[in-house]
Image (tube, rainbow, N blue to C red):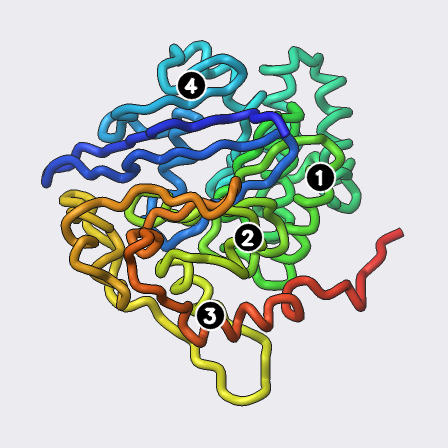
Amino acid sequence: MSKILEVKDLHVSFNTHGGEVKAVRGVDFHLDKGETLAIVGESGSGKSVTTKALMRLIPNPPGFIKGGEIHFENKDLAKLPEKEMQKIRGKDISMIFQDPMTSLNPTMTIGKQIMEPLVKHQNMSKSDAKKRAIELLKLVGLPSPDTRFKQYPHQFSGGQRQRVVIAIALACNPKILIADEPTTALDVTIQAQILELMKDLQTKIDTSIIFITHDLGVVANVADRVAVMYGGQIVETGTVDEIFYDSRHPYTWGLIGSMPTTDTEGEQELVAIPGTPPDLLNPPKGDAFALRSEYAMKIDFEQEPPYYKVSDTHYVKSWLMHPDAPKVEPPEAVKVRQRQMPANYMEPVLVEEVRS
């Protein structure tokens, strides 16, 4: 696969009264054409800041891109003038935000909000934009699109509003779609519908997706590759199978171990990661996860670990990968979930609603 996006040594900071908060600290990753990359981690790990930096949506002040490169179609988005960035934002790279109600203008009809990027970026006439907007409402599975076109956001349910936000994001057939926890505010049933919709739309419009979430269960269903973030850094990256079945970083183990399961045989312990994420106003020396890790060694508190290569697609930022480090096994809770995952997440659909 060819790369459509490549991020190199990205640093993003925020100036506050207390000093500089180093929210993103040397992030490297790439996105291939047609793939879905999931970025996972706890709140405050730097997921949303990283992806907003890709679209240059970091409010300045107080935020700013301190360093690094964001390569997209032979352009470095980190250094691109704002006028040039406006031509890319919403057209070539679109974003679905977490809360659909705050993403929509309550004073404008849904139809006008979908038409807006079509008129601005595609230079469509209003009549053509209206026709395309109705097609998009139908594409994202909203019934009676002609009627819905004239309605306002408050007349839609939460799941329907998220479908509208997806329609707006897809209006210009973007090459990259960034989805920032698009299902967090929705119930489990609607969440499944939105995830299935995104998978279906990806094949129809041939786009690449960056999916931000804290829910590893969601990742198993939508992603090709996974990047695990902690303390403003990517600590492990690999294919879905590598992250779920052969993860090597203690933080990744913690995320897997904290996943609830549907298994009813015996008591299953829900493991919590002890402690709290680091204060990025004063980032810790060495491995940022050391204070929360039961496997931390002396060197973890003194030197930041490099990335160790497990395979061509699997890299881990941990001193545990050093040849001289003690050999450790994932906790039992992680092994239990690894054994259960095929049944929980990979089973074929038994019952499905079919709309005529």
Q: Which mark is residue 334?
A: 3
Residue labelled with disc 2:
183
Label 2 vs label 1, nearer the camera: 1
**Where does residue 271 sit, x and y in percent of width and height?**
39, 73
In depth, the one of 55 and 156 nearer the eye is 55
Residue labelled with disc 4:
77
Cα–Cα span, label 3 and label 2: 25 Å
In depth, the one of 345 and 155 nearer the eye is 345
Circle nearer the N terminus (2, 1)? 2
Tell me whether circle 3 and circle 4 mark residues in contact (CB < 8 Å): no
Residue at the bottom extreme of this rendering: 266
Image side of residue 291 versus residue 159, left or right: left
Residue at the right extreme of this rendering: 356
**Which amino acid type is shown beneath numbered disc 3?**
Val
Label 4 vs label 2, nearer the camera: 4
Cα–Cα span, label 2 and label 1: 16 Å
